[in-house]
Amino acid sequence: MLKNVKIGGIMKKLLFGILLIVVGCAGTQDLAPDGTPIPIGVNTIIFQIQESPEDAFRDIGRHLIQNGFSIENSSDQFLTLTTSYRNTSSGSLSAATDISITASVMDDHILLYGTARQGMQLGTTDLGENRIEHRGQSGSIMRNAWDELYQLALSFSENLRFETR
């Protein structure tokens, strides 16, 4: 009888531990300004614009500069600009993450997407460049890059759509 009590108590603790891990890993779903879930894997944020494409191009460029980015390339003809890389908050992997943002204005919308460049803080090891997308756990390199891109977009407009391109 005593054996059953010990095993039952151990099983309860084990099941409770597994439940905590499952709930902890599930996390919360990121929501768009309209309350709909942001799909995992999207890599492009789209703004609807009411102004002329030229004015929108100037405004998104100004917004990026006001948020600490410098413009590396710009085309007035194609209404596209790309920023230089800028450091963003580090993830739990002790890696430095730099992000570059590209904005393209097309007719009645702006496409915003980015690239994350990762390298170890204690050396010059380059871990490569990746298109920023909505994925990863909180504190991961990709999630930090996505959060930075999303907050940048949200501070420009709440009229957002999300796509994978």
Image (cartoon, rainbow, N blue to C red):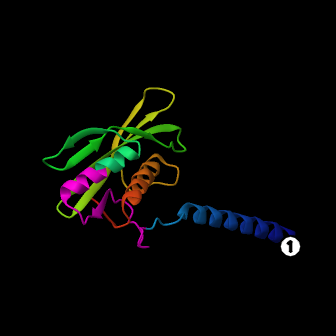
Point out residue 40 in the picture as x, y percentages from the top left corner.
39, 62
User: Which residue lies at the image location 16% right of the left edge and 46% below the top edge?
Assistant: 76
Tell whether position 56 is magenta: yes
Residue most toward the left? 77
25 left or right of 110 in image: right
Which region is colored magenta?
A: 32-60
In this orientation, does residue 54 appear? yes
Tell whether position 103 is magenta: no
Q: How many dots with numbers?
A: 1
User: Which residue lies at the image location 35% right of the left edge and 47% below the top edge?
Assistant: 64
Out of 12 and 78, give the one closest to the viewer.
78
Which amino acid does the dot numbered 1 rest on? Met
7 left or right of 28 in image: right
Quadrant of the image containing the C terminus: bottom left
Out of 114 and 107, give the one closest to the viewer.
107
Out of 71 and 44, give the one closest to the viewer.
71
Point out residue 5 in the picture as x, y percentages from the top left corner.
82, 70
Point out residue 32 in the picture as x, y percentages from the top left corner.
41, 67
Residue most toward the top? 123
Q: Is mark 1 on a helix, strand or loop?
A: loop
Vertical order, 129 against 39 (above or below): above
Point out residue 155 in the picture as x, y percentages from the top left corner.
41, 57
Out of 52 and 110, give the one closest to the viewer.
52
User: Which residue lies at the image location 49% right of the left edge and 37% below the top edge?
Assistant: 95
Crowding around mark 1 (Cα neighbors within 10 Å: few <14, some 14 to 19, many 20+) is few
Where is mark 1, residue-wise? 1
In this orientation, does residue 131 appear? no
Residue most toward the right? 2
Quadrant of the image containing the N terminus: bottom right
